[in-house]
Amino acid sequence: MIREEMMKLLCMIAALFIGLTTPAMAASCGKTAAGFDAWKTAYAAEARAQGIGPEGLAALAETSYATGTIKADRGMHSFKLGLDAFMEKRGAATIVAQGRKKKTQNAALFRRIEKTYGVPPGPIIAIWGMETAFGAYMGNQNTVSAVATLAYDCRRPDYFREQLIAALQLIDNGVLSASSTGAMHGEVGQTQFLPRNVLLYGVSLNGGGIDLNDKADALASTANFLRGHGWQPGQGYSPGEPNFVALQGWNAASVYQQALAIMGTEIDGN
């Protein structure tokens, strides 16, 4: 009799444990496409709890596992190069030459941006050239699918779940849509903002709503990002100077940071 009661108690505990842990397990992470649909269904409850509305939830439901995103994420090797090799691979000389022309062609825009945010043209133009070749290559990967795939993937799920919630908020706000496209990791616009940075630093320069596919909004938002990462007007941005920390905020790779500083300085003519 005691044995039967003990068995019943153990079964009840087991059932309770399964009931509590199944959603969490479903929303943990995965390394293949097999569990993605179950994961996004489970994660929708968490997104709803964080305030995501019907449009954002519908966009999440429409996502598909982005195999190309995973392939790109596993194949990031250029940041392991030395500085000279990295700059050659990324076409630094071309970026500087084209960047000087862009500075002249958009002189009024850059004056307005510097007056508003305190950031000179050089580093903004260097970022613009490095990220999308001045808006020529913004990517065609579905943004929400890319971010949802990385939020599900076991490599960096916590980081990309923040990005996913931000992307869904942007959809609810009308800044993005379920069909928005961009780079393989979910970056959008002419300077490739991740969704959370769009929320934090995205600006509409002309007051018509944030559109980072628009040159003016993208460049102003980039300046706003740098200001938000400690940019001090009038100070230098080469390694060891006060504003280099803002460039470090843009990208974690040391070679990328140094390349931006070098190209920006050459574009600015310093």
Image (cartoon, grey):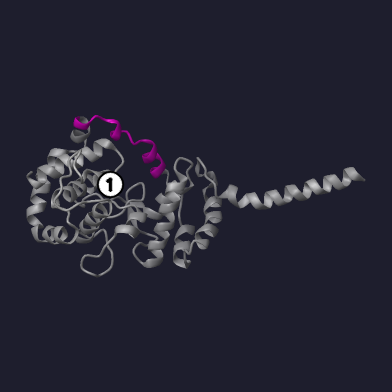
Helix, strand or loop under label 1: helix
In the rendered structure, the answer to whether residue 75 lies left or right of residue 136 reads right
Query: Residue 183: percent from the left, percent from the top?
Result: 32, 49
Query: Residue 131: percent from the left, percent from the top?
Result: 24, 47
Q: In the rendered image, which residue does mark 1 sit on?
A: 250
Q: Amino acid at mark 1?
A: Trp
Magenta residue check for 73: yes
Mark 1 surroundings within 10 Å by alpha-carbon count, few (fewer than 14), some (14 through 19), many (20 or more): some
Query: Residue 113: percent from the left, percent from the top?
Result: 16, 59
Seen as rendered, the residue at the extreme bottom is 208
Q: In which quadrant is the N terminus drawn?
A: top right
Query: Residue 224: percent from the left, percent from the top?
Result: 24, 57
Magenta residue check for 219: no
Q: Name the dominant secondary structure of the magenta segment.
A: helix
Taking the spot 51% from the left edge, 62% from the top edge, the residue there is 48
Question: Residue 155 falls in which quadrant of the image?
Answer: top left
In the rendered structure, the answer to whether residue 9 lies left or right of residue 250 reads right
Q: Give the magenta range.
A: 68-84
- Front-lying residue, 10 or 175: 10
Instruction: Please say whether residue 153 is visible from this viewpoint.
Output: yes
Total numbered badges shown on the rendered structure:
1
Taking the spot 8% from the left edge, 57% from the top edge, the residue there is 107
Q: Does 79 sit above or below residue 53?
A: above
Instruction: Please say whether residue 95 is visible from this viewpoint.
Output: no
Q: In which quadrant is the C terminus drawn?
A: top left
Q: Does 252 sit above or below residue 52?
A: above
Question: Residue 203 falls in which quadrant of the image?
Answer: bottom left
- Front-lying residue, 29 or 236: 236
Taking the spot 12% from the left edge, 48% from the top edge, the residue there is 99
Taking the spot 12% from the left edge, 38% from the top edge, the residue there is 93
In the rendered structure, the answer to whether residue 230 lies left or right of residue 37 reads left
